[in-house]
Image (cartoon, rainbow, N blue to C red):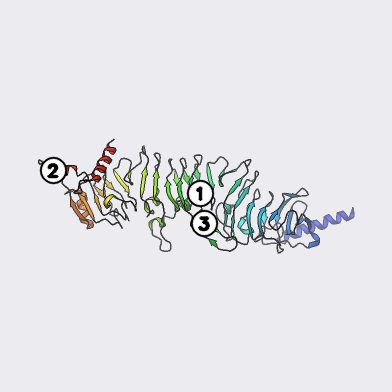
Amino acid sequence: MKKNSLAVVSATLLFFSGVCAGGIFASNSENIVKIDAEESKIYKGLRYTSNGAEIFIVGFTKGDYNTESELIIPDTIDGIPVTKINSADKLPYSDYNVITLGRNIKEVSNGCFRTCDVLTVPDNYKGDLGKMFKENQDFSKVIIRDTCEYIPNDLIVWGGNGKFVIADYFEVSDDNKYYSSENGVLYNKDKTKLIRFPAHNEITKFVVPDSVEAITDNAFTYFGQGTSNTTNNFTYINGTIDWFDMGKNVRYYGRDSIYEITKRAKKITLPGSAVEEYDSRLVDESLIDGDRSDKKPLELIVEVIDVPSTANTVHDMFLNCAPSLRWFNVEDGNKNYSSDKGVLYNGDKTVLIKAPQNCDFDSKTYTVSNKTTEIADKAFANTANLNTITIPKSVSSISSTAFEGSKLTKIKGYTGSYAETFANEKGFEFVALKDNTGDDNPPSKEFAYDVNQDGKVNVLDFIELKNYLVEQG
């Protein structure tokens, strides 16, 4: 009995000396508890010590739970929860294919492991996973168990301690009450929030599920990029995707949520809902405006943008940062937008909003709708394939930046119209069109058939007439 009492007193003194010295309960994971070999125990290849309430892993030896390819940290040892990996030893096996961290792990010392392929995370690990590894990590799979309530922050946002942590696939237990996954994508339980998209998901098309109402901060960060498990530097992979559908019911897009995937998508379908908010930090506005001298302006590779019938917002980056864009395609029934030959207008075509920079205009000419009254800011800015434009009498306002950086040289219009005034002010060649209204002399048969008034009668006139009849219903 006396021996037992002395043992309890000794253990208690050791426990409090550890606390006072900034030991096992210190918040700084660099404060390593020094354990002599004779004071620790071995359990299936795991060297550990205990204060009676918690168990701390302090070293590894080869055994059932620690092989050259796999490390398993159990939830408990002899009924006591394993809460910390606090090893000051040089680990014999630091390159693991699979690491399964126990449900109760709360802290892992900095640089405890070197690399890992498949990781099972603890249930409520509050630290950054990146800190426990010596190098950047690119996990082929991250496993979330049924009782996990909290996913380490750097799996969702940024790397810890200067380390980058990327997951290529999320696997969530069906019984988890907080999270779910589908095809490797991480969602909240009811899939109303898309939390994280795998960095190396080798897909050609991704459609945001109809259930999703919000895409959270950094959801697609690192998409198309990767790290090497053998170096400390990122190996950037310029991945692309053929088609990104932003979702029918998404109302909120968080900070940097879709930046990486939109700049890598060749075709984009805009949100088919009333978007309530794009986070103001969705993309750096200075990259859209080209105002940053230290960074290259944003350039999307998108070629086609679909605008669903219920869409009410087209973000500025889709209007001004898409040098490869050839076509806006607005679905019938949209009250906010319409399109003509790939050019984007508002719903009733009174405002010409944007012509795609890489639109292949017929014979490098374009005729503005006769319903249009305004040509908006940068409407034809940087268009590469437009030399001549025909502007109807109805247009009474043209932005000074409407043709900024374009190849336009000639404006066709009517004498005395605003088009003539604008052409003269900006130094464009102006070609006056014949006005047949109230003309006592009827036009020649040939002129009557020259619908687009380019001085020729050919298939382009038929196309112009067909488009006009479609517009009129």
Residue tagged by mark 3?
Answer: 225
Mark 2 lies on a secondary structure that is loop
Q: CA distance from mark 3 to mark 2?
A: 63 Å
Q: Quadrant of residue 331?
A: top left
Identify which amino acid the numbered label 1 is placed on. Answer: Ile
**Which of the two residues, 419 or 52, is positioned nearer the viewer here?**
419
Mark before the other along the chain sequence, 1 or 2: 1
Q: Is residue 313 visible?
A: no
Q: Position of residue 196 (x, y in %)?
A: 54, 49
Q: Residue at x 21, y 43 (%)?
A: 451
Q: Are marks 3 and 2 in contact (CB under 8 Å)?
A: no
Identify which amino acid the numbered label 2 is placed on. Answer: Ser
Mark 1 lies on a secondary structure that is loop
Residue tagged by mark 1?
Answer: 203
Residue tagged by mark 2?
Answer: 444
Q: Is residue 403 left or right of residue 48?
A: left
Q: Is residue 260 left or right of residue 24?
A: left
Q: Position of residue 100 (x, y in %)?
A: 67, 52
